Image: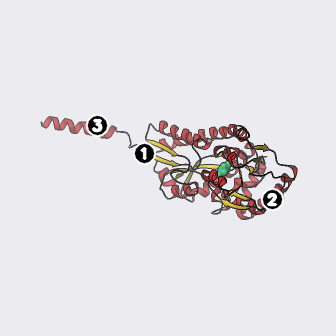
Amino acid sequence: MKKLSKLLAGTALVAATSAPALAEVWDMPMAYSASNFHSVTGAEFARCVTTGTGGEIEIVTHPGGSLFKGADIKRAVQTGQVPIGERLLSGHQNENALFGFDSVPFLATSFDDADKLWKAARGPISDLLASQNLTLLYSVPWPPQGLYFKNPVTSVADMKGVKFRSYNNATSRLAELTGMLPVTIEAAEISQAFATGVADSMISSGATGYDRKVWESLNYFYDVQAWLPRNYVLVNSDVWNATSPANRNVIRGCAQLAEYAGEWRSKEYTGFTLQGLRDGGMTVAPPSDQLRADLEKVGKTMTAEWLEAAGPEGRAIVEAYRAMK
Ligand code: PCA
């Protein structure tokens, strides 16, 4: 009997020392629909981490704003309610103008330019996030932003009084400067907002119009290519610092892969979704010369306002970006 208990104790000890670290589950809220390329990229990133850490960290994505709505995700990660999440960071422009560097009209209007702007901004944005207990993992751009309307629009004068769905400060300001009436609505809720007439227009990518089937309510998409806003995957810095160096390496590697694959998907999704809008019955067209010229004026005003609000740090980002062009 004595022998047996000794043996059992020995086995237990061996089991305890050779057991893998406890598997952790990281719930990852995401604001956009499961079929959207950001969510697909996030799901792949999650699998990469789960596989790469040998199951020590299992990331479970929750797309469509099902765990936290977009507007609540940054705070949820910051306060440790969840360890990780994805957010459209320009949604926090009202907290710090620097977060709006990617939504300055006509500053960067192609994927190539958006890449350069991101190279210039990555350091300052990472530092700003670090000061808020957040560690930046990766960022992926949305396709270029165009204008959606119910009725045809050929100049800014035609936009007067139209109810406009906004998603950050820049989009609300654009509405104000064009005489429209902004109302902030999450992407997850726009189909209903358009169906019930809460809004009759927005600026967004073909991707979001396609994901939300906006052709059920809207008829025109003008491919203005005003800017390419970005989503960001953030980790709570306390969680990050408590993660083993080996697992951090795996996560960094998966993040690099996700940033690359996500942008590639964004590019592929651009043409596919614009065709999807056409197939849904919408007119997809470039803006008229008049509309383009009117919007460029609005863009100048907004650029000046943003540079003023973002101060020397904002100016440094724009200068570093221009130096790469
Ligand atoms: N779709 C998101 C942000 C930018 C975009 O293309 C939205 O409309 O909320």
At mark 2, the secondary structure is helix
Task: Find the distance from the CA under tag 3 to the CA under tag 2.
Answer: 70 Å
Residue at (85, 49) in percent of width and height: 288
The residue carrying pointer 3 sits among few (fewer than 14), some (14 to 19) or many (20 or more) residues within 10 Å by Cα, namely: few
Q: Which mark is residue 24?
A: 1
Confirm or deny contact between disc 3 and disc 2 (CB under 8 A): no
Nearer to us of marks 3 and 2 is 2
Q: Compared with residue 3, is residue 221 higher up or lower down, i.e. above or below?
A: below
Residue matched to label 3: 14
Task: Find the distance from the CA under tag 1 to the CA under tag 3.
Answer: 22 Å
- Residue type at numbered disc 2: Val
Q: Which quarter of the figure is the N terminus placed in?
A: top left
Residue at (70, 44) in percent of width and height: 206
- Residue type at numbered disc 1: Glu
- Residue type at numbered disc 3: Val
Q: Which mark is residue 276?
A: none
Residue lying furthest right in this view?
289
Residue 124 shows up from this direction: no
Taking depth in this image into account, of 186 and 249 the one nearest to the observer is 186
Q: Which mark is residue 298?
A: 2
